[in-house]
Amino acid sequence: MNISVDYYAHNNSLRESSTGFKMSLCIITMIISVISPTPLIPAIVAVLMTLTILFVADIPASYYLRFAAVPAGFGVLTLVLMTLFFGVNPAATIMGLRVYSDGLQTGLLVFSRIMGGFSCLAFLALTTPVNEIFHELGRLGVPPALTEIALLMYRSIFVFIEEASVMYHAQDTRLGYSGLRNSYRSLGLLAGNLFIRSWLRGETVYRSMESRCYTGSMPSLRKQSMGFRGMAMIILFDGLLVTGLLFTSGVWL
């Protein structure tokens, strides 16, 4: 439970930075990356955001590589499939499979957009706690009911995971997974009791919140403004990306 996205969101070198600054940088950069007609800009975004995550936010490289493995795998799979099956201009034949040049270009573009967009979201997720993100959305005009429900749902996820972990370890210490038959039986019991246990635990959490004067809103103690320096950094960084986007728009043909 400690080695998780939520743990690093609360324990990184950019933890004290403005939430508005990080959200604005993430959203604007991600939009630029996604709308880019060439893979160059998204690739630059992916590299710069990854370097920021590793060396500025001090997120361990081993954890980030595991964190990025799934979207990278989907991106590589998309690249391979589009190269082999989507295109009209065959360029070569490998083991009986045609490689299409236009499919390769499209696959590279999609792959770069996936990694560029993911790196932006990873930057926000690994440097900003979820409750601060939702409170910032509330400041931007999102209805309070939606943000509170989202926060409660996020809290319920950890309750769900904790109950599943406790039940699994209790079964495992009693040799509940010693064989295939016992494993299926224990897994069925875990799945059948998990909903009831999570429901009861959620009721306990809600009563605890009510006893602490919960009135339907969870205020945040951090209300930092972006400031002129943060705005200048976003304008400079994303302005350079937009300039590169304009100069490279006609290169990728």
Image (cartoon, grey):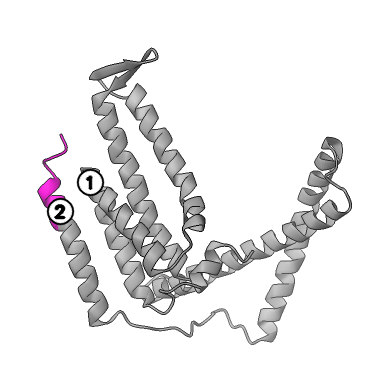
Location of residue 193 with respect to 85 vertically, above or below: below
Give x and y (percent) for residue 99.
Answer: 31, 21
Q: Nearer the viewer, residue 130 or 125?
A: 125
Image quadrant assignment for residue 47 = bottom left
Circles 1 and 2 in contact, beta carbons < 8 Å: yes
Name the residue at 35% across, 52% down: 117
Q: Looking at numbered disc 2 in the image, what kind of residue is underneath it?
A: Gly
Compared to residue 21, the image places residue 32 above or below, namely: above
Mark 1: few, some, or many residues within 10 Å (few <14, many ≥20)? many
The quadrant of the picture occupied by the C terminus is top left
Residue that carries the numbered disc 1 in the rendered image = 40
Q: Left or right: 174 with respect to 111?
A: right
Residue farthest top in this picture: 96
Label 2 CA crowd tier, 10 Å (few <14, some 14–19, many 20+): some
In the rendered view, does 16 fall on the left or right side of 233?
right
- As rendered, which of 27 and 79 lies closer to the eye? 79
Residue 27 x %, y %: 32, 61
Mark 2 element type: helix
Residue in view at x 23 percent, y 50 percent:
41
The image quadrant that residue 202 belongs to is bottom right
Q: Which mark is residue 244?
A: 2
Q: Determine whether the residue tagged by mark 1 lies in a helix, strand or loop.
A: helix
Q: Is 186 placed above or below 145 here?
A: above
The picture places residue 131, in percent across and down from the top left corner, at 50, 73
Residue placed most toward the observer, 163 or 57 = 57
Magenta residues, start to end: 243-253
- State the residue at coordinates (39%, 63%): 53
Q: CA distance from mark 1 to mark 2?
A: 9 Å
How many marks the image carries: the answer is 2
